[in-house]
Image: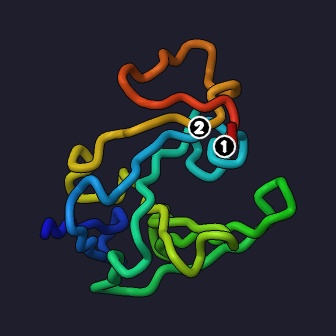
Amino acid sequence: MPTLTGSCFCRNVEYELKLASNDDARTSLCHCRNCKKAFGTNYGLTAKVPKEAFNLTKGAPKEHVADNGSGALIYREFCQNCGSFILEYGDAAKDHFRYICVGSLDDPEALPPKGEFFCKARASWMPEIPNVFHKQEVHE
């Protein structure tokens, strides 16, 4: 059973992921406007993991809740000291999954992308990632 660790930039918030296999995580890029704003870049990069796989080991993140643009709430957790984004989840997933910000992992290469969402909003200069799924919307 692999255990991955992660933290915010200042390490006030630390966590571990206990997965049966790294394949239990679905890492994907999201090119929607909401993710671009939240991540402060041209896409969001998260790994969807079972809620019970995530365990805080140090600190407590601050939570921000807002409409994701479609009428559903999205919860984002981040370090209240350095501002590093740790995870997110929506109303539909909150009881079952967490979307870990891959950049917060101590070894972000442990969970490579399996796909891309909202490809219709991908920056024109950004190439498509080869050998992964590509969806123009979330539900196709």
List x then y, in percent, for residue 36: 63, 42
Q: Nearer the viewer, residue 95 or 140?
A: 140
Relative placement, left or right, of 43 versus 112 is: right
Question: Where, quadrant-wise, is the C terminus in this rendering?
Answer: top right
Mark drawn on residue 114: none
Tag 1 residue: 138
Provide residue 37's location: percent of width, then percent of height: 67, 46
Q: Residue at x 62, y 22 (%)?
A: 123
Q: Is residue 84 visible?
A: no
Of residues 51 and 121, the one nearer the viewer is 51
| Secondary element at image label 2 | strand
Q: Is residue 102 above or below residue 85?
A: above
Q: Which of the two labelled residues, at mark 2 and mark 1, occupies the earlier sequence position?
A: 2
Q: Which residue is disc 2 drawn over?
A: 117
The amino acid at mark 2 is Phe
Q: Are marks 2 and 1 in contact (CB under 8 Å)?
A: yes
Q: Secondary structure at mark 1?
A: loop
